[in-house]
Image (spheres, coloured by chain):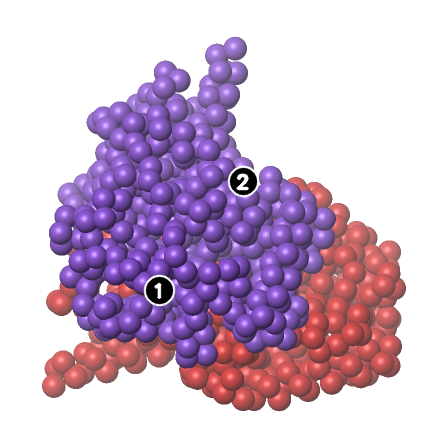
Chain colours: A red, B purple
Amino acid sequence: MDTVDIVVVGAGLAGLSAARTLRNAGRSVVVLEARNRVAGRTFGGFLRNGVPVELGGQWVGPTQDAVLALVDELGLETFRTHDEGDGLTAYDGTVTRYADETFGLPEASAAEVGKLLAEIEELASTVDTHAPWETDGAEDLDRQTLDQWLTARTDDTLALGFLRLLVPALFSAESPELSLLHFLFYAKSGNGLDTLVATTGGAQESRVVGGTHRISERMAEELGDAVRLGAVVHTIVQDGDGVVVRYENAAGGGGGAVAARHVVVAIPPMLAGRIRYSPPLPALRDALTQQIPAGSVIKFQVGYPTAFWRDTGLSGFVLSLDGEVGVVLDNSPEDGSCGVLVAFVEGAHARRAAELGPDGRRKLVVDRLVAYFGPAAADPFDLVEQDWTAEEFTRGCYGGRLGAGVWTQFGRALAAPVGRIHWAGAETAETWNGYMDGAVRSGYRAAAEILEILAAEQG
Amino acid sequence: MDTVDIVVVGAGLAGLSAARTLRNAGRSVVVLEARNRVAGRTFGGFLRNGVPVELGGQWVGPTQDAVLALVDELGLETFRTHDEGDGLTAYDGTVTRYADETFGLPEASAAEVGKLLAEIEELASTVDTHAPWETDGAEDLDRQTLDQWLTARTDDTLALGFLRLLVPALFSAESPELSLLHFLFYAKSGNGLDTLVATTGGAQESRVVGGTHRISERMAEELGDAVRLGAVVHTIVQDGDGVVVRYENAAGGGGGAVAARHVVVAIPPMLAGRIRYSPPLPALRDALTQQIPAGSVIKFQVGYPTAFWRDTGLSGFVLSLDGEVGVVLDNSPEDGSCGVLVAFVEGAHARRAAELGPDGRRKLVVDRLVAYFGPAAADPFDLVEQDWTAEEFTRGCYGGRLGAGVWTQFGRALAAPVGRIHWAGAETAETWNGYMDGAVRSGYRAAAEILEILAAEQG
C-alpha cells in the first residue's frame, strides 16, 4: 500500500487545484480519479472538422479571479465569446428580436421582469454567503421554494415564465426544486444575477483557447504519475493516525489502497455520499449528501460552415420559453473557420429528452434552431451531444442544488471537515458556487485547511 | 461463487417477504443483509426490567391486510394499543386536555383544522396511487410544497402549527420538504389522513406481541442459511444471462459474490443509489435515488413503575407544538407490568437533538414529559433511545419522501424494474406506502414480477 501525505479523490478542477497546492507546499499527494480522463465536469470534444468544442463547463468571466489567475499561470489563453448583434427571445409561438435591455418582452412584462430582478438582487445582498443559514430571516427564505416566491410576487404570466426559464439556465433544475435562500445565495456568490446571466461583463464573457479541460490537463501534467485514472474509490477509513482510501479498478481486476494523513474528497456531495466511510459519517453530513441532487442537462454543439446568423445582425443568443431548447449562444471558434451554436436542453426538458434516442434529440434541437434562425439552421455539418445525467461519475450538471429547508437544517455540514476528511468541489464554494472558479477556490481552501493542520502538528 | 435463482438485497420486511414468496414458489434464494441482524427498520430492544420495546416501526392497524395476514401466518399475535382516556395538546406554553375531536384547540382553530383536513381528504381522493404523476393536475400539485399549500389556505396560526406538526409525525420531515402531491399520495395510500393519525381504527391500533421485528425473524428462520448477515452489497452486475451481486464482509476480511437470474433490491431508494451498477443505472432511475432523502427521527422508550397517567384518566397521547417532543403515546406492555411512554423527536427537532449528547437528549425528553404529565414523569427507571439517522444501513426513518417536482419528473422510475433488477421496500408501495404493510406488499409485488418472467421463460 502506497503512503503519501494527502490523497485526493477526484481529478476535476477542485481536486487538482488542491493537489497542486499541496504538492507545491512540499507535500506528497496521490489523486484518484474514477474516469479514464481528468477534468470532471469540463470535457473537450471536437466537431468533425477538428474544431474543439467544450462538452461541459466552458465560460469564464470577470471577478472569477481564481480560475483566471490559474489559466494565466498554466500558460493558457482566453478569448472573448462572440457577443455582437441582436438577441432573440421565443415565447407564445413567436420569436422576437431585440437590441435593448427588454429581452424582447412586451413593455409591461419587461418592466415586471426588471422589478423582480431588482427585488432578487436586493434580497440576495442580505445573504451571508459564508454561512447562509445565519442570514437574517434564513428560516423564512429557506422554507419557500423559488417558485413559491415568484408566483406570490407576480401575476404577469410572461414575466413569470421568463424568470422560471432563468432557473434551468443556471441550475438545470426547475424553480420548485430549489429554495429561495439557495437561489439568493447562488446569485450573490456569483456577483449578482445580472453577472450570472450576462455574456460581456458576466459569467459567459470569455472562453479558454483549446477548451477549459486544458486547465485540468495542465495541472495533471505537473502532477505526473501522482494522478491515477480508472481508480473508483469505494471506501475511506480513518482513525487517529490517518486515512486509508480504497479503490476498485474501473477496468476490473482488483483495486488498491493508499494511506495518507488526510484526504480531500473533491467530487459532488451526492457522489461523496456513495462512498462508504469507516467510521460512518455523522448523521448531519450523511443527510446532507442525500439532499443535494444534481441538475439535468444535455448540451449540444451544432456546427455550420459559417456563423450565418451574424450576417443578419444576430448575436446567436436565444432565450426560449417555447420548446425544449431554452438557451443558445454563439460558440464559434475564434478564427472564424466555421460557425457553432451551443444549445442547452435543461431541467424538465432534459429529463424528457433523455428518453428519446440520439436521432430524436437531434431533430428536436435542429427544429428549434430553425425556429430561431430560419432554414439556414436546418443543415449542420455536425452535432455533438453530451448528456451529463448519463455519466456514471457525474450524474448530472451543472451542479448540486439545495431544496426547501436544506440550507438551514443541513448546510453547516457542506464544507466542514469530518476528522481527516476535507470536502472540496464547486458545490462547497462560497464565491462563484457551482462554477469553475468556485471549484478552484474550494480546492485551495481544502489545501489550506490541511496545510494549517500539518504545520501546527510540526509545531 | 454461489448460484441461485434470485438474490435479495436487504433482510427487512420487504426483502424477506419477497424471498419467502420466491422460496415457497420453488425458487432458490439468497438474502444478503449488511447488518448483523434482520428486520431493517423494525428492531427489538428491552427496558432494564426485561420488557420488550420496539425501537423502530411498531404499530399495525385495520386495512393493513398484508402484514396482518403475515403476522397470523407466522403464528404471531397482536394486542391493542392502550387508547382510553383523554388526550393532551401542548401549544403556546400551555397543555390542554380534551376528550372530544378538537385536539384541545380553541373552537375556531379546531374548526379550521377540520376544514383543512377535509380539503386534504378531498384532494387526496383524486390521486392515482398507482401512477401519481398521472393524477389530474399532477403538475400543479407537485409544483407546490405542502407548506406552500398550507400557508396559502389558512391565516390561523394555531391551525397552521397543528397541521405542520402532523407532517414530522408522519414523515420525520418538515412541510416544505415534501410536495403536496406526495402528501396526498401518502395519505390516500394509507386509507386517508384520519386513519394515519388514529390509534383505534387507525394506523396505531395494534402491536405485535414481543415486537414487530419478530415478523422478520420468523421469516428468516424459515429461510435458514439462505440469509447471510454482515454482507454489505457494493456492486450489481447484470447482462443478458443474469446478475452477479458482490458484497464485502461487514466484519472486514474480504467478501464474496452470488450469481442469480434476478435480483430484488429491497433497501430504501437512497441506499440503493449507493450501490454501484454495471451497466450504470439509467439516468432517470439514478436521479430518482438522489431525490428520496430519509426523514430524521430519534425514538425514545421511557419506562415507569406504573402507567401513572392512566390513574388520572389520561390516555398517554400527546401532540405538542411546543418543544422538541412532538408526539407521545402509551406504549406499556399488555400485562401492565410497568408503564411505558414512547416519545418521538422528529424532523427539525431530531436534526438539532442529534447534536446533543445522550444525557442532553434524556433531559430534553424527560423535561417535556414532566410538562405534559407532571412531576410523576420525572423519574423513569429506564430510557432507551434509537437514532435512526445515525444507523449506517438505514440513514433515516420513517422513510424516503418526495419533494417538490420529484413525483412528476422522476416517479415513474420508483418501482419499474431495470432489466433483471427489481425494486422493493416500503417506499415503492402503492398501498400503505412507508408502512410495514407497504413493505410486505412491495416484497410480494417484486416476487410476483420475477415469478411471472421465470414462468414465461419456461414456456
Chain to which mark 1 belongs: B
| Residue B138 visible to an observer of this rendering | yes
Compare marks 2 and 1 and give the one earlier in the sequence: 1
Nearer to the camera, A291 or A244: A291
Nearer to the camera, A48 or B359: B359
Which residue is painted at 74% across and 50% down in the image? A364
Which residue is painted at 23% across and 48% down in the image? B336
Which residue is painted at 79% across and 52% down in the image? A367
Callout 1 secondary element? strand
Q: Tell me whether marks 2 and 1 sit on the same chain.
A: yes
Q: Which mark is residue B97?
A: none
Nearer to the camera, B40 or B324: B324
- Amino acid under label 2? Glu
Mark nearer the viewer, 2 or 1: 1
Q: With A372 as the anchor, is A173 left or right in this view?
A: left
Q: With B370 as the anchor, is B267 left or right in this view?
A: right
Q: Give x and y (percent) for residue B415.
A: 51, 39
Q: With B394 as the anchor, is A311 left or right in this view?
A: right
CA–CA distance in space, label 2 to label 1:
27 Å
Chain to which mark 2 belongs: B
Residue B55's place in the image compared with B413, above or below, is below
Residue lying at the far top of the rendered structure: B459
Callout 2 secondary element? loop
Q: Which mark is residue B345?
A: 1
Q: Give x and y (percent) for residue B115.
A: 64, 62
Using a 10 Å C-alpha cutoff, classify the residue at mark 2 as few (fewer than 14 neighbours), some (14 to 19) or many (20 or more): many
Residue A300's place in the image compared with B72, above or below, is below
Using a 10 Å C-alpha cutoff, classify the residue at mark 1 as few (fewer than 14 neighbours), some (14 to 19) or many (20 or more): many
- Amino acid under label 1? Val
Residue tagged 2: B430
